[in-house]
Image: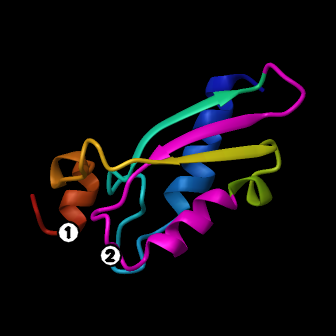
Amino acid sequence: MTNEELKIKVIEEGLRQIYDPELPVNIYDLGLIYGVECDTSGEENRCDITMTFTSPTCSMSDILLQLVESLPMRIEELDTAKVNLVFDPPWDQSKMSDEAKLTMGLL
Protein backbone atom coordinates (compact mmCIF):
# COMPACT_ATOMS: atom_id res chain seq x y z
CA MET A 1 0.00 0.00 0.00
CA THR A 2 1.35 3.43 -0.93
CA ASN A 3 1.33 6.51 1.27
CA GLU A 4 -1.44 8.04 -0.85
CA GLU A 5 -3.58 4.88 -0.77
CA LEU A 6 -3.34 4.74 3.02
CA LYS A 7 -4.15 8.45 3.28
CA ILE A 8 -7.29 7.99 1.17
CA LYS A 9 -8.35 5.00 3.27
CA VAL A 10 -7.81 6.92 6.53
CA ILE A 11 -9.89 9.81 5.21
CA GLU A 12 -12.70 7.81 3.62
CA GLU A 13 -13.01 4.87 6.03
CA GLY A 14 -11.89 6.68 9.15
CA LEU A 15 -12.20 10.44 9.38
CA ARG A 16 -15.30 10.78 7.22
CA GLN A 17 -17.04 8.24 9.48
CA ILE A 18 -16.56 10.37 12.59
CA TYR A 19 -19.38 12.86 13.05
CA ASP A 20 -19.36 15.85 15.34
CA PRO A 21 -21.84 14.86 18.09
CA GLU A 22 -23.45 18.31 17.93
CA LEU A 23 -23.62 18.69 14.13
CA PRO A 24 -24.82 16.46 11.26
CA VAL A 25 -21.42 16.69 9.53
CA ASN A 26 -18.31 14.51 9.65
CA ILE A 27 -15.14 16.05 11.05
CA TYR A 28 -13.29 15.92 7.72
CA ASP A 29 -15.91 17.87 5.77
CA LEU A 30 -16.43 20.16 8.75
CA GLY A 31 -12.81 21.22 8.20
CA LEU A 32 -11.45 20.06 11.54
CA ILE A 33 -8.74 18.01 9.82
CA TYR A 34 -5.92 20.27 8.64
CA GLY A 35 -3.65 17.52 7.35
CA VAL A 36 -3.08 13.77 6.98
CA GLU A 37 0.45 12.57 6.30
CA CYS A 38 0.99 8.82 5.95
CA ASP A 39 4.22 6.82 5.83
CA THR A 40 4.26 3.22 4.67
CA SER A 41 8.04 2.95 4.16
CA GLY A 42 8.97 1.55 7.58
CA GLU A 43 8.05 -1.48 9.62
CA GLU A 44 4.77 0.18 10.64
CA ASN A 45 2.23 2.07 8.59
CA ARG A 46 1.67 5.36 10.38
CA CYS A 47 -0.27 8.57 9.88
CA ASP A 48 0.19 11.96 11.43
CA ILE A 49 -3.13 13.76 11.62
CA THR A 50 -3.26 17.48 12.31
CA MET A 51 -6.63 18.63 13.57
CA THR A 52 -8.41 21.36 15.46
CA PHE A 53 -11.79 21.96 17.06
CA THR A 54 -14.40 24.57 16.31
CA SER A 55 -13.36 26.19 19.58
CA PRO A 56 -10.61 25.54 22.16
CA THR A 57 -13.43 25.06 24.67
CA CYS A 58 -15.36 22.56 22.55
CA SER A 59 -17.37 20.36 24.91
CA MET A 60 -16.93 17.31 22.67
CA SER A 61 -13.16 17.64 22.22
CA ASP A 62 -12.25 14.60 24.36
CA ILE A 63 -14.68 12.36 22.49
CA LEU A 64 -13.56 13.52 19.04
CA LEU A 65 -9.89 13.18 19.94
CA GLN A 66 -10.42 9.63 21.23
CA LEU A 67 -12.24 8.67 18.04
CA VAL A 68 -9.43 9.96 15.84
CA GLU A 69 -6.76 8.31 18.01
CA SER A 70 -8.62 4.99 17.71
CA LEU A 71 -8.27 4.84 13.90
CA PRO A 72 -5.55 2.12 14.00
CA MET A 73 -8.03 -0.20 15.72
CA ARG A 74 -10.55 0.32 12.90
CA ILE A 75 -8.31 0.42 9.81
CA GLU A 76 -6.42 -2.83 9.36
CA GLU A 77 -3.58 -1.33 7.30
CA LEU A 78 -2.85 1.42 9.84
CA ASP A 79 -0.54 0.58 12.74
CA THR A 80 -0.07 3.98 14.39
CA ALA A 81 -1.85 7.32 14.33
CA LYS A 82 -0.39 10.40 15.95
CA VAL A 83 -2.77 13.30 16.44
CA ASN A 84 -1.39 16.82 16.50
CA LEU A 85 -3.95 19.18 17.99
CA VAL A 86 -3.56 22.81 16.90
CA PHE A 87 -5.56 26.01 17.26
CA ASP A 88 -3.57 28.12 14.82
CA PRO A 89 -4.96 28.87 12.38
CA PRO A 90 -8.28 28.97 14.19
CA TRP A 91 -11.18 27.07 12.65
CA ASP A 92 -13.83 29.05 10.80
CA GLN A 93 -16.65 28.22 8.39
CA SER A 94 -14.42 28.76 5.35
CA LYS A 95 -12.71 25.45 6.17
CA MET A 96 -15.94 23.50 5.62
CA SER A 97 -16.52 21.61 2.37
CA ASP A 98 -19.37 22.78 0.14
CA GLU A 99 -21.25 19.60 1.03
CA ALA A 100 -20.98 20.43 4.74
CA LYS A 101 -22.10 24.01 4.11
CA LEU A 102 -25.15 22.70 2.22
CA THR A 103 -25.97 20.32 5.06
CA MET A 104 -25.72 23.16 7.55
CA GLY A 105 -27.82 25.49 5.38
CA LEU A 106 -24.94 27.88 4.77
CA LEU A 107 -25.12 27.73 0.94
**In-image side of 59 versus 11 (left or right):** left
Residue 19 pos. (x, y %)? 45, 69
Query: Which amino acid, by three-letter code, is at mark 2?
Result: Leu
Vertical position of residue 106 compared to residue 63: above or below = above
Residue at the location (62% across, 25% down)? Answer: 4
Residue, disc 2: 23
> Does the magenta segment cover residue 44?
yes
Residue 30 pos. (x, y %)? 32, 57
Residue, disc 1: 104
Stretch in magenta:
41-70
Residue at the location (79% across, 19% down)? Answer: 41
Give the quarter of the image for residue 48: top right
* Measured Cα–Cα span from mark 2 to mark 1: 8 Å
Front residue of 68/96: it is: 68
In which quadrant is the C terminus drawn?
A: bottom left
As drawn, the residue found furthest toward the right would be 43
